[in-house]
Amino acid sequence: MFKTNEANFFKTEDFEQIFYLKNFTTLDKKKPILVFNYGLVCSNHHWKYQADFFDSKGYQIVMHDYRGHFQSSGKNDISKITFQQLSKDVHDLCQFLGIKKAIMLGHSMGVNVSLQLAKDYPNLVQGMVLISGTFMQLNDVMFDSNIMEFITPFCLAGMQKYPEVVNKIWNSSGMNPLIRNIIHSTGFNKAKVSKEFIEIYLNRVSQLGPELFFQLITEMTKQNITSSLDRMKMPSLVIGGHKDNVIPNHMQRGLASILAHSETYFIIDGSHVPQADFPELINERIDLFLNQHFSKIA
């Protein structure tokens, strides 16, 4: 992924292991540091094109797996996977690496994590790039309706009553061509994102399990951060795709209107994952934002 890869684990105060990957050996505090936070049951695969681009531009980058995800531990205590805990893990990881200031890049649920970091650790968050996210309760905005208010309890009841069946369906979803096509059509720009990208995404989703998914859905439903947004004074770039079927654009516009120093960028024909649909355009816009507000790469 990077020209220089250094992968390792950070041990948290409660003895969980957080996997991280960085592209530098010695931290240069004069250069911008980018920390990537991915979305709901996603992975760093969603940042594939950004990681390659910003590594080639000379930015210092940290990528990580949230607790309970992939190479990080924490799967045995899903109840502890809250936004407060996830943001603390990222903060403590940065402290461990000697990072005092960082620019947070968040996609979808990663926006919630980034905003929680800005609320709880404002001295750490130097700037934010927020893609396809919302600050409002998920039940009220997902798919631009309140359908999740009815679907979530039904699915939770089914999972509790028939856990083996639900897990079997979940684990095999990546192999189902109908599910692959639905995800490809509704969550991405099908003409721009390859089938292989979707297959990798769904195969990684199947590794995480429905329990984690619904734990994080619950977190996105109950996060209450609206009253803190106007106190976030760092420069922020809010990005959305005009054809986002998951989180409507008016959520990003509303977020940008509250943040004190924000810019917006909406990309025509962009989906919920515009950084995969149009990586060149998204990368150039983020790079422009970084160069305008932070130290340029020498």
Image (cartoon, rainbow, N blue to C red):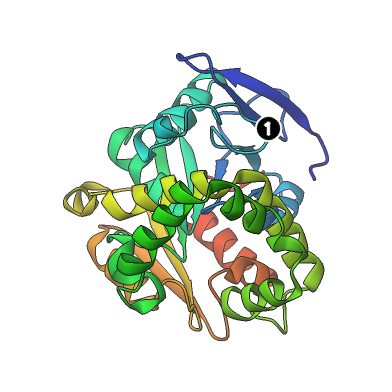
Q: Is residue 96 left or right of residue 52?
A: left
Task: Look at 24% across and 49% down and name the residue there.
Answer: 225
Name the spot of residue 101 as percent of width and height, x first.
45, 33
Disc 1: CA contacts within 10 A as few (<14), some (14-19) or many (>=20): some
Name the spot of residue 210 as percent of width and height, x first.
54, 50
Task: Look at 68% across and 45% down and name the residue there.
Answer: 207
Name the spot of residue 92 as percent of width and height, x first.
46, 23
Q: Is residue 249 above or below residue 45?
A: below
Label 1 residue SS: loop
Q: Is residue 257 visible?
A: yes
Q: Identify the image quadrant of residue 150.
A: bottom left
Task: Look at 41% across and 35% down and name the residue there.
Answer: 87
Q: Is residue 278 visible?
A: no
Count of numbered circles on the image: 1
Residue hosting label 1: 71
Q: Is residue 105 left or right of residue 263?
A: right
Q: Is residue 229 left or right of residue 47?
A: left
The residue nearer to you, when weighing 107 against 290, is 107
Extreme residue toward the left, this view: 227
Q: Identify the image quadrant of residue 175.
A: bottom right
Extreme residue toward the front, this view: 161
The residue nearer to you, when weighing 154 against 122, is 154
Q: Is residue 237 above or below residue 231?
A: below
Q: Is residue 152 above or below residue 38?
A: below
Q: Identify the image quadrant of residue 58.
A: top right
The residue nearer to you, when weighing 54 against 119, is 119
Name the spot of residue 93 as percent of width and height, x first.
52, 25
What amino acid does circle 1 point to?
Gln
Q: Quadrant of the C terminus?
A: top right
Q: Quadrant of the N terminus?
A: top right
